[in-house]
Amino acid sequence: MKISFQTFMAGLVLGIPAVWADFKPFRFCQLGDIQLGFGLDGYKNDTYRMHLAAEQVKKEGFDFCIAVGDLTNDRTPEQVQSFQSVYPEFNGRVHLLPGNHDISNVATLKQFSVDYNVSDHGAFSHNGYRFIMLDSITLMSNLTEFEPYTTQEWSWFEEQLAEAAKEKAEIIVAHHHLPFEVSEDEPDNYWSFPNRVRGRYLDLIRQYGVRHILVGHRHETKNIYPADKAFTIYVVAGTARFFDNNGFGINYFNVTSLDSAKNVTQEYVRLQGVTHMKRSLGEPRGCPDIFAH
């Protein structure tokens, strides 16, 4: 990539690496729990809504999207095959992350990579931004069999943050579970990081100036803010089942500069072409347990 002298000097003045001084705006999206098999109307209709999401993503022409976990509900061959059959319709634009319905032990951790041909965590750079995608199951579980994976992922996370900071990249983090839902000191609950790791995670988020965190798991669509408004947690329900009044939909993000605090904007857009919009009552049951008791 050839860079002009003017661009190089502008980068020096602004403290921006010269390779990023020619920043180009971009758009990406956040898909919630696709979770084939969890919907009230059967996995075939869940699969159809996944197809509708693919059509919507292609129509919008996003640079890429991130699916924040729970790709199927039960990991049955029928559900996995249905996911695999629709996934190519996204034309390679979607990065996949696992949820607690995808991974609950080391065997399913390994199977996740086999089924979807991806790692359970990873990172990529785009126009001066570093996207760090975590496996929140191994990150926060205390199961003995996960211990080496947990240790490795925390080290990798810290290395990715430090490397991004060294490159003066803006950082966006994505994973399945909520760091917290109401307040940073809330009691442990099913939806969010347990207190024994929450503080460590949030300290890193603040230390490296992360402003945007993408999550799923809750089957609701809302934004969550800490008391100091240092960052935003974006929760989106997805396309299988929702427990609020916001329906099925996708989060659209527009990035217009290398200032992530001011120029990353989000809009929630409902899934287009869907006919079933019945709100679910109660709470999920029969979810895989990823903790030792």
Image (tube, rainbow, N blue to C red):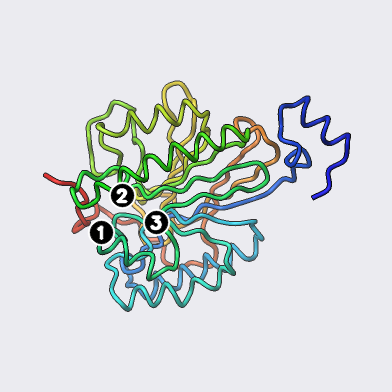
Callout 3 secondary element:
loop
Image height of 78 relative to 270, above or below: below
Secondary structure of residue under mark 2 = helix
Label 1 to label 2: alpha-carbon separation = 9 Å
Residue reaching furthest left?
Answer: 293
Please name the residue that numbered disc 2 is placed on: 149
For the residues labelled 1 and 2, say whether their Cβ atoms are less than 8 Å apart.
Answer: yes
Mark 1 vs 2, N-terminal side: 1
Residue count near mark 2 (Cα–Cα under 10 Å), binned few <14, some 14–19, many ≥20: some
- Seen at 30% across and 40% down, the residue is 192
Task: Estimate the spatial distance between the alpha carbons at disc 3 and disc 2, rounded to whole Å.
Answer: 11 Å
Vertical placement of 293 versus 239: above or below? above
Residue under pointer 3: 120
Mark 1: which amino acid? Val
Front-lying residue, 113 or 272: 113
Q: Camera-side residue: 75 or 44?
A: 75
Looking at the image, which residue sits at the far top?
Answer: 228
Q: Measured along the vertical axis of the image, is residue 94 above or below residue 149?
A: below
Marks 1/3: CA–CA distance: 11 Å
Nearest the eye: 38 or 273: 38
Q: Residue at x 37, y 50 (%)?
A: 135
Q: Quadrant of residue 185?
A: top left
Residue nearest the viewer, comparing 107 with 216: 107
Q: Looking at the picture, does residue 246 appear above or below residue 164?
A: below
Q: List x then y, in percent, for residue 76.
A: 28, 74
